[in-house]
Amino acid sequence: MAGTGRLGLLALLALWLGGCATLPDHVERLPSSAEDGSGTALCNIVDHVLPGDPLLTVSGFRLLPTGGFALDARLALAARAKRTLDVQYYLIANDETGVQFLAALKDAALRGVRVRILLDDFYTSGEDSMLEGLAAYPNVEIRLFNPMPLGRGSTATRLLMSLGELARVNRRMHNKLFIADNCMAISGGRNIANEYFTRAGTNSFVDLDVLSAGPVVKTLSSVFDTYWMSDVVYPLFSIDAPPRDPLAAQREFDHDVDSIRPDARGRKRALAASQQKAPSAELGVTPLDDDDVVKPAESTQAPLAATDPLGHRPVSEDLESGDMELHQAIAEVLADSPQKAAGLNSTTLKGTVTLDIDEEIAQARSEILIVSPYLVPGKTAMANIRDAIARGVKITIVTNSLAASDAPIVYVGYRRDRMQLLRLGVTIYELSPQIASARVKLGDFRSQLGRLHAKAVMIDGRRIFVGSMNMDGRSGHENTETGIILESQTFAAELKELIDRDIELGSYRVRLNKEGSLVWVSHIAGHEQIVHEEPGVSFFEKAYLDMLAPFAPESLL
């Protein structure tokens, strides 16, 4: 009876807390949409680089494989935008990279650029003051996807105050999208935090973005607008009360930025200098003049190399020259509906990015490369993989080792399928921080990264997908996702080159030995090493996962 009473009290508490967490009704969402950027410096460069395409079927693209170049691209576009910046992310952290990024958006707003920021609300815990300060500036509006309105000081209190709505708050916006003047965009796997831009030492991620230019950006803007006006998205000040003193909120934002960014003083000097100069006319395809742009402040990040691993200069240098190296391709934008947050895909994959990629796998004829940090294929993908193997398709999967994963519980689902995948004939590589560290100790500094966050698929050496979608149940049923499919042998070859490099420098190949048991094989300094247990983790870590395994539903992994 005592146990029953406690359960009853917990149920009442959950109902009470759930009622407290109800989202506000009758929220005013001022309508806005993507604007035409024609005539801006960025759009003029696009017009110069890309030939006229009356059917609007071909756009220009560039892969952004390294953190430093990917951050440079975002800051360069923010500094050169003239009319609009549309920003959509799962996470913007309160760290050096996050505040540098937000400060760049503020600087753009002060130049008159309209800045719309759409954030998933799960990781904004403790950031309300900073977001309120940024939103207090003119030309900035911030909205939150599927917010948790109470207990906002920490993730724990938010979840506690949302006990009655856990099914709702479990559904998150995993999209990553950055659009400048509606003519250049960056999408892919990176959130905005130190570890995604090689600023977190050995905790940094291997990740991948795509820079897009041309007609495809209009489609990406349409996706952003659909989310921006969705009824599952709430203006920041409908969840948090607007600051009583906007100027004080702005000063607090600047103080927060200065306390985290070592380069804040340099940024202030750059901004002050730019504001003293007379505004210049819009430029055509000639090099961008210093008067036309607030240059990104110096960063504590290591200086960029002359070129990235694919031979491209930094985007900032390209923009300064008034020219860009882009490869042309036909592209298809994939995007989940924001209404996925209402649970519309809790039992089916219909209409999702996951289903689109499953269908790509089902149509493969010769080769499939799957890159996913969190890998729980599920019944549909496993059936497609089995059918592809039967057709003679070569399949390679690159994912995280248990030691590399920042979400070990997801590894439970992958571990369930791994043996079956190997028996089918799938080649599996697992990235390992131990191998990357061992290479550094031997003087090989080409890669210090042993953790994967990139999400990509290559089909038949001619089609690639790069986006936010993991091959797991969360991406299929709970999170919203976006991505781009490029029809291009050039990009397929580049993706394969990048992944082969990561495999060589920091991965185990997982195999079955003669007895049918798992082994992990690596090659360092010309020597083969074979490990017979999950490498890089303790007995207790493995035992903990064994204990959790029966309670980990595949749809939530």
Image (cartoon, rainbow, N blue to C red):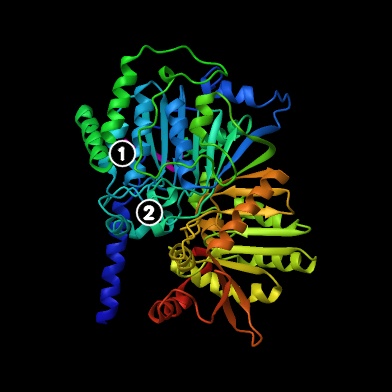
Depth check: give the residue in front, 508 or 345.
508
Span of residues in magenta: 231-240
**Image location of residue 554, percent across then percent down:** 53, 68
Question: Please, what is the three-letter code of the amino acid marked with disc 1?
Answer: Leu
Compared across the picture, whether 240 is left or right of 462 comes to: left
Compared across the picture, whether 457 is left or right of 554 comes to: right
Residue on which the image places disc 1: 131
Question: Please, what is the three-letter code of the amino acid marked with disc 2?
Answer: Ala
Q: Is residue 206 above or below residue 2?
A: above
Q: CA distance from mark 2 to mark 1?
A: 23 Å
Cβ atoms under marks 2 and 1 closer than 8 Å: no
* Quarter of the view holding residue 541: bottom left
Compared across the picture, whether 194 is left or right of 422 comes to: left
Magenta stretch encompasses residue 526? no
Q: What label does residue 70 carry, if any? A: none
Q: Is residue 502 above or below residue 410?
A: above
- Residue 30 showing in the rendered view: no
* Quarter of the view holding residue 409: bottom left
Residue on which the image places disc 2: 200
